[in-house]
Image (spheres, rainbow, N blue to C red):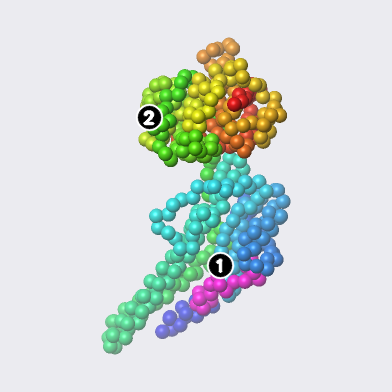
Amino acid sequence: MKRLFLIGAFLLLTFPQYVFAASILDCTPNTFSCICYKTDASAEPVTIAATDMSDLYDDCRAACTQIDAGKNLIRSFAVQCIADGAAQSVIYGMVGDNVDPIEDALTPRLSVEIPGFDPELSDSFFGDGKNIESNLLGRYVEAVYQWLLAAGSLCAVVLLMVGGLQWVIAAGDVGKVGKAKDRIVKAIFGLALLFGCYTLAFLIDPSTVAFDSLVIQVIDRKEMISESGDTGGSLSLDTSNVPESFKCSADYSLLEIAEAAVGNVCYRFGGGHQPGQPPFSAETYLAPDGTPYSTFCPEGKLCLDCSAYVAYLQDCKGLEGVDGAQGTTAIFSDSRAEKITSCDELSVNGVALVPGDLIGWKSVKDPADSTKTLLWGHVLMYLGDGKTSDSAGGKKGRACQAVSVDDLTDFCDYDTDGYDKYVIRQ
């Protein structure tokens, strides 16, 4: 009994919030704290003056952003509740003046739902322009830990009840009473470990319970474009047989058709031109497993290079004009091609673009060696509302993420090494 009393006293003094069942409901704005986590994993507590629980998240983010002041030293923050003298982490978020939030970030679909965890509420952002950072993993681990606390507590209660029942029916049998006591002691000791590990780690070093952002390297689309290229010829794709999910119909806007193509088009050099099916004779890159990309097009996907893709958009929407399938060199050698001298959010050369306009540049060969290409040609289609779409794939980007929908300003900023860009208007 003395051992039981000591363990109970230990729990009472060290983890009163668990003994008295303190919860998030016991927290008020006055009992919350805001902690800013720096890039070197150190933590800096700050004072926030929130008067409403719903404002805590935004107020903590704003406070850490103000401290950072564009120095890019603070990468994340945590809002923590101080209930009954112990810190309970509530939610993590991202911060930083150079943070570019990703509003439509992909989130995982859990096979088993974790109570209290919603992947959609995770923050994802472009941390330094080359990597995507997300607090998804940290929030997931935290949710799993909270779930394990509840599950472990339930198991411990069951073991305590079993031990108590064994003690009652032992009828004074010393051996059976000893086993019952041992079961009860182990259940209580397990509870102490379960609930004490987080607090102990936090007291030793708060950074041990602050999960670093998950960093995912981003394939530079400009690099993909520079390694793309296309071939000329007619469009081999019969758009009437394209699955309905591709929205290849004049009933949809160009933006809707392009958005439906995102994730469903794989880049292949020469893909979409005659003969249209593998092998794609112009394609020379290899898949990670060594299989030539020229030999296959994944089932249910379209394999198109940049000019075949804009021809696909033209065919779906029923647009007339310069045939995109003839290739970038032919497209921008057309008499209607206009050299671009200025470019902004909605217009080129001071004239607003309209959906269906083609923009891009020609391939440039080395004058000293005609077999060497200095700049691969590329073509994009203007979709309207300042958006463009194209198909591109570098050495590392032949996977089926060839199509993207981007701002016109991205095209304006693209460096073609001094070579001319062109526009062909509808």
**Helix, strand, or loop for circle 2?**
loop
Q: Which mark is residue 405?
A: none
User: Where does residue 81 sit, x and y in percent of width and height?
Assistant: 59, 68
Residue type at tag 2: Phe
User: Where does residue 336 sit, x and y in percent of width and height?
Assistant: 61, 19
Can residue 403 be seen? yes
The alpha-carbon separation of the residues under discs 1 and 2 comes to: 53 Å
Tag 2 or tag 1, which sits nearer the N-term?
1
The boundaries of the magenta stretch are 15-33
Query: In this view, which residue lies farthest toward the top?
Result: 368
Q: Residue at x 56, y 72 (%)?
A: 25
Q: Is residue 30 above or below residue 394?
A: below
Q: Nearer the viewer, residue 206 or 306?
A: 306
Q: Which residue is mark 2?
A: 296
- Residue 277 figure quarter: top left
Q: Nearer the viewer, residue 148 or 340?
A: 340
Q: Residue at x 40, y 58 (%)?
A: 112
Around disc 2, counting alpha carbons within 10 Å, would you say few (fewer than 14), some (14 to 19), or many (20 or more)?
A: some
Q: Which residue is mark 1?
A: 88
Quadrant, the N terminus = bottom left
Can residue 220 be seen? no
Q: Residue at x 42, y 21 (%)?
A: 274
- In the displayed structure image, the side of residue 298 where residue 49 appears, left or right: right
User: Where does residue 80 sit, x and y in percent of width and height?
Assistant: 59, 65
Q: Is residue 191 above or below residue 121?
A: below
Q: Residue at x 49, y 37 (%)?
A: 251
Asked if the magenta segment contains residue 294, the reply would be no
Q: Is residue 271 above or below residue 205?
A: above
Residue type at tag 1: Gln
- Residue 367 figure quarter: top right
